[in-house]
Amino acid sequence: MPKKSVRERRLLVVAAVATALSIAVGTMPAAVANQAPAKESQAASTPTGTSATPDAALAGANEKSAATTPVPSAETPLSVAPSQTPSAPAAEVSEATGSTSLSSPSSEKPSATETASAPVKAKPSPTALPTPSPTIRQRILASPLAEEPKAAAAAEIPLALAAATIGVPVGNPPTDNAKLVVKTGGTRATSTTVNGLAGVTYDFYKVASETVLAIPATASIGSCTTNAAGECGILAVLSGNNNANNYFIAVQSSTSGASQSGVSGTWSTAASWGATTDLIRYNSGAVKKNDNAASRIKNMPSSGRTWPTVLSNPVASQKCGIKMAVVFDLSYSVQQSGSVSAYKDAGKIFVDSLAGTPSEIAIKTFASRAPGQNASFTAPAGNSSLGLTSVAQGSGVTTLKNKIDGLSILQNSSDYYTNWDRGLAQIESGYDVVLFLTDGEPTRYGPSASGTGSEATLQNVEEAIHSANSVKATGAKLIAVGIGMGSGENNDTQRLKMISGPNSGSDYFSTDFANLGQTLKTMATKDCLGTVTVVKEIQEPTGPSTPGAQWNFETSTSNVTAGTSALSSGQTDANGALNFKVAGFITNQDSETRDVSITETQQTGFELVKQTGNFNAKCTNVSTGTVLTITNSGTLGFTVPVKKNDVISCLVTNKRLVSSLTVIKTAAAYNGGNPVTGPGSAPNVPSGTSVTWTYTVKNTGTTTLTNVSVTDDKAGNATCAQTTLAPGATTICTKSGTVTAQQP
C-alpha cells in the first residue's frame, strides 16, 4: 500500500472526531477547508452550495488530492487565505432547541483586497497559508503524525457552510469572534416593544465599512432563522490584527416560514424605507479582536429596536355597510399648505357619500402624538377621538360632520410633527377598514414623540411598520392616503407601501388636497354602487325618532339580494339599515334602469307613516342628493328605479302605537243650582238627590281607540257621545243617578 501523505493521515484522524460530532454543513471558504473532518474512504463529490455531511463534502477533495501532486499546477485556482488565525470550532448550545452542536468555522470570505482567485502561475509561498490557532485541529496535529515533514499545500475545495441555525448562540463569543444577533418582530406588544416573529431567515456578510449595506460579491458568512422570540444569530470570525476593524451586515433572505402566534396572514421583507438605496438592512459597526466580549456582541438593529417585517394587508369586506376608522393627520404642514378648509371639506364629502347606508365611521387624529393633542392630551379638545357612529340616520351624519369641522391643526412645535407610529398604534380592533390620511413623511415615533421632526428616518418608518402590522392583525384593511406627496413611484409612496401594501389604488392612494374629496368619495361608494339601502325609522310617542332594528324587508325583484346573503329578504341591523344588492342588468350600460320592489313586514304595535306625497318610503340618490320618484307597491311596499352606479337610500318610517287615555269625573247637583265638583268642594247633598256625573275621556296615546266605554263602580255604566277616539281626541260620557248615603 502506498504511504499516505501527512495531509491524508491528518484527515483520517480528523474524520474520527467528525464521526462523533456529526456536523451538518453548508458552504465553507477554502481558507478553512482543512479544519473540516473527512473520511478518506468516500469518493462521491458534492456540488458547491449544496447541503452535505462533512464526510461527503470532503470526499471529492480527497479524491482530487490523490490524483494530483501536492503542488498546484499552473492552471489550478488557489484561494489564498487572509493573514489571520482561524478560531476553533466552538461547541454551542442552541437557545431554541437546547441541543449542543459544534459550530463550523466561519465561512466569511476575505474581501477583494485579501483574496486572490486568479489562476496561480507558480507555487505559492508557504507564508501565505494560515497558521492554525490552538484548536481541536491543532491539538490533533500535535500528535506524532505531525512530526513528519510538511508536504506542499494542495489546492483546497470550498466546503458547504453550516445550515441556518435557529436562535442565538449561547454566551459570549469566543476569542477572535463576534456574535451577530438580529431581532425581528411582527405586531406591537406594548407602545415601545414588539412581539417576536419566528421562522425568518437572515444571511450575514462581511463588508468594507460601516456605511455599506449592499450585498457584496463574496459569499455569505452564515445564516440563522429566528426563534419564537424573533431572535437568531451567528458567530463570525474576526480578521486582521487585534486593532483591525471588521464590519458585517445582516440581510433578511426569507420570510416563507415566518409566523406569529394568533396572527393570520403572510409576512414579507421590508425592502426599503424610501429611495431604492434606503435599504432596510443593518450594519454591525466596527468590531475588532481586542474588543471585550460584550463589545463583540452586535445587535442588528441596535439594542431596543426590532427589524420590521411587513404583514399582508387583509382583503376588505366587499359589501355596502362597513365599520371604518378615518385617521386625520393634524400636523402643522397641513396649515402651511393653506389647505385646512379643503381638508375638512373632503372629510365631510366622505361622510355624505355614505349617508343613508349601513356604514359606521369613527374619527381619529394624530400629530406628534395620538390623539393629535398636547402632551397632557387636554387640548385641542376637538381633536379627541369619536367612536363608531352610524351614518344610516341623519343624526349620525350631523355628528360626524360637526366633529370634522371642530378639528384643529397643532400650533406648538412640541406637538405638531408627524408620528405615523402613534397614529396607527391608537387603532383598536373592531374595524373593517382603517383609512389613514397623511400629508407628510414620518418625522417622529413612539409615545414620547422621539426623533428630529425634520425628516423621515429608518427608525421612524420601522416603528410605523410595527404599528401598522398591529392594525392589519385585527383583520382591518389598512388604506394609506398620501396627500400632496406627488404622483407615481417616489420615496413617499414607498413608505406608504411599507405600512399598507404594494397595490396602488387599493392598499394606498396618492392625491392632493384639491382632489382629496373626490378620492375619498370614490373609495366610500365603491362597494355601494348599484344598491338600495332601506333605513327604518321609528317615531316614538315622545322624544326623537329611533332606529328600527330587526325589521324584515323582502324584495320580489329577481337578481336582487339582501345583505351579504343570496336571499331575497333580510332584517335591519342595530342601526335600522338593510342593504339590497341589485344585479341582473341586461345591457350593463350606465343608463339602464331596473325597477326594484321592496316590502316590509308590519310589526304589531306599529303603523306605517306616509312620506311626503303619500308614499310608503322616501328614496334618495346618495351620490347626487336627488329625491327619486317612486311608486307604492301595496299598502306596505314601494318600487324604486335603480341604475348600476346608483347609491340609493330609502327611508321607511313607522310609528310606535301606544294605547293610553285619561278620564276626569265631575258631578252637578240640582240643590239650589250649586255644581258639585268633587269631595273637596261638594256641599252636603241630601240622600235621594238626583245627580248627573260627567266623564271627560281623552286619547293620549298614539293609536286610535275603539269601543270606548266608561263604567263607574259606584254609579254603573255611563253613556259616551263617541266610542272611537283618534290620538288626541276627546269625548264626554254621562251617568245620572240618585245620591245615597256614603255615595260620593
Image (cartoon, grey):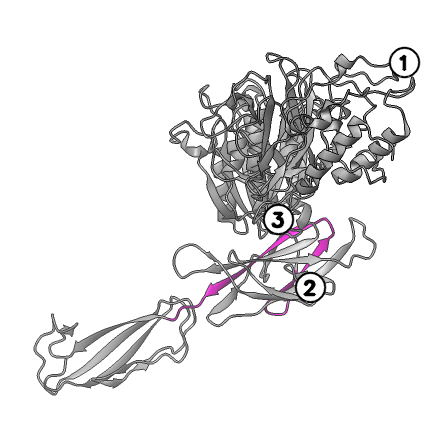
In the rendered structure, are the residues bearing label 3 and label 1 in contact, judged by CB atoms less than 8 Å apart? no
The residues tagged by marks 3 and 1 sit, at their Cα atoms, a distance apart of 59 Å
User: In the shown orientation, is residue 491 left or right of residue 450?
Assistant: right
Q: Is residue 485 visible?
A: no
| Label 2 to label 3: alpha-carbon separation | 28 Å
Q: Amino acid at mark 2?
A: Ala
Q: How many marks?
A: 3
- Where is residue 371 shown, x and y percent of the image? 46, 33
Q: Which is nearer the eye, 174 or 244?
A: 174
Which of 152/101 is in front?
152
Q: Tell me which numbered mark, 3 or 1, is placed earlier along the sequence.
A: 1
Amino acid type of the residue tagged 3 in the rendering = Ser
Query: Which of the numbered marks, if any, corresponds to residue 264?
Result: 3
Residue wearing tag 2: 566
Extent of the magenta region:
631-659
Residue depicted at 46% across the width and 21% down the height: 411
Label 3 sits on a secondary structure element that is loop
Q: Magenta region's main secondary structure?
A: strand
Q: Point out the frontmost of discs 2 and 3.
A: 3
Q: How far is mark 2 from mark 1, CA to CA?
A: 80 Å
Examine the rendered structure and indicate whether residue 721 appears above or below residue 294: below
Q: How would you rate the neighbour count of disc 3 (Cα within 10 Å): few for under 14, some for 14-19, many for 20 or more?
A: some
Local crowd size for mark 2, using a 10 Å CA cut-off: few (<14), some (14–19), many (≥20)? few
Report x, y in % for residue 295.
53, 21
Mark 2 element type? loop
Mark 2 and mark 3 lie on one chain; the one further toward the N terminus is 3
Q: Which residue is mark 1?
A: 121
Q: Residue at x 53, y 22 (%)?
A: 335
Residue at point 83% right, 33% down?
Answer: 62
Residue beneath the point at 76% across and 55% down: 593
Which one is in front, 141 or 668? 141
Q: Relative to residue 140, is residue 700 depicted above or below? A: below
